[in-house]
Image: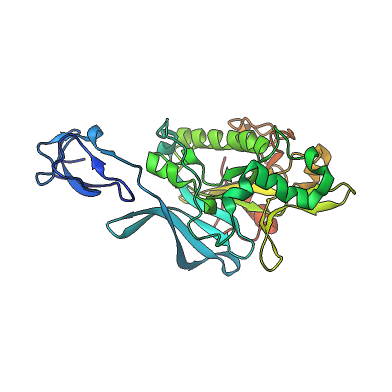
């Protein structure tokens, strides 16, 4: 920053800005650069001070808001971010299916510096605001809640599926560490950025993709737009051998809601060159390799391809999640809800 440039500090929510030289508590304050990392505010601070001394007594609270903008099939776009001095600053947005109560995708940017994210950030609880109405989302994802929900569908076969090592986690779409600073990382803990994801896949190939992609973008210098989303409905067999679609709740009109997705995907688009690619994973540890390959809806671009040697996932692992890659045009043939943008080449 140059001398005289200003910054707005905010701890809005339930806390205030803490500083050894403060003369009174404030939740929002403007400071000006005195050179280097020294900042001042004559009306608030008793003397100029180094930047690292500014802290929040309590982390600021992120919020979601329903916009007037629409995405696929007339669904609303929900923005998640922070309110500062009555102005809303979004960090990412989600296309949210209000009927089925599932997220189609979260959209955000990822740049080379995102690999240098802040570490040792406490994980907050997920919040729903009012986006899920009366549905008890926290309870549905709890060990007891998810086991009860799936047991209603598969009956006595439940113990074959929900175990100590395989269960449904709160699967981030925009990942916590896809954001550089603590306030961005915390804001990913919202149910409009989350879907039921089998824990082996969550900590396996999906995590590998997140880490490898973040590092690859850092090395290549790409400035990307990311669409991370879900498609389809996962299934399990009941005691009679019938395939049953998985949902975590039935609403007051007896409609199944909060589906367990069959696919998680991450579409990466580099708008400057108009290059893109889709990475897809199957969210079901109980399908065989043969069954998984039959679910692939495109030619797998990444398999044995030197252009993707940076990707270290294990694509044929049932426990880590079966995975494959598509061109954007091929991806669109199966997944209709991806927003329109021009693609001229494959992003490698």
Q: Residue at x 73, y 43 (%)?
A: 284
- Quarter of the rendering containing residue 72: bottom right
Q: Residue at x 47, y 35 (%)?
A: 220
Colour scheme of this structure image? rainbow
Identify the residue at the far right of this view: 240
Left or right of 55, for residue 46: left
Q: Residue 313: x, y in percent?
A: 64, 32
Q: Quadrant of the C terminus?
A: top right
For residue 207, above or below residue 197: above
Q: Residue at x 43, y 43 (%)?
A: 186
Is residue 152 in view?
Answer: yes
Q: Nearer the viewer, residue 287 or 257?
A: 257
Q: Residue 21: x, y in percent?
A: 15, 36
- Quarter of the rendering containing residue 156: top right
Q: Residue 272: x, y in percent?
A: 45, 50
Is residue 325 in view?
Answer: no
């Amino acid at each position: 920053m140059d001398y005289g440039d200003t910054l707005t500090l905010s701890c809005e929510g339930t806390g205030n800005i803490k500083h050894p030289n403060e003369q009174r508590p404030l939740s929002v304050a403007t400071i000006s650069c005195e050179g280097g990392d020294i900042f001042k505010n004559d009306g608030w601070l008793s003397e100029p001070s180094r930047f690292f001394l500014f802290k929040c007594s309590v982390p600021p609270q992120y919020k979601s808001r329903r916009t007037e903008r629409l995405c696929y099939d007339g669904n609303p776009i929900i923005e998640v971010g922070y309110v500062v001095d009555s102005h809303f600053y979004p960090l990412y947005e989600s296309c949210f299916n209000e009927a089925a109560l599932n997220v189609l995708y979260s959209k955000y940017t990822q740049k080379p510096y995102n690999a240098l994210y802040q570490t040792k950030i406490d994980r907050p609880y997920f919040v729903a605001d009012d986006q899920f109405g009366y549905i008890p989302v926290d309870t549905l994802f709890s060990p007891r809640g998810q086991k009860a929900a799936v047991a209603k569908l598969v009956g006595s076969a439940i113990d074959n599926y929900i175990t100590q090592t395989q269960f449904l986690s709160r699967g981030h779409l925009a990942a916590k560490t896809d954001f550089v600073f603590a306030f961005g990382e915390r804001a990913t803990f919202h149910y409009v950025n989350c879907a039921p994801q089998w824990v082996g896949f969550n900590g396996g190939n999906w995590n590998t993709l997140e880490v490898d992609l973040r590092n690859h973008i850092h090395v290549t210098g790409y400035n990307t737009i990311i669409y991370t989303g879900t498609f389809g409905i996962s299934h399990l067999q009941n005691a009679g051998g019938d395939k049953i679609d998985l949902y975590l709740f039935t609403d007051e009109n007896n409609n199944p809601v909060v589906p367990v997705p069959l696919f998680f995907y991450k579409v990466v688009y580099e708008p400057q060159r108009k290059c893109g690619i889709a990475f897809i994973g199957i969210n079901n540890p109980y399908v065989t390799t043969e069954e998984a390959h039959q679910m692939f809806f495109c030619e797998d671009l990444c398999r044995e391809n030197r252009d993707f040697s940076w990707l270290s996932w294990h694509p044929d692992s049932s426990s880590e999640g079966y995975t494959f890659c598509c061109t954007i045009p091929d991806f669109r043939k199966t997944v209709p809800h991806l927003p329109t943008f021009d693609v001229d080449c494959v992003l490698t």
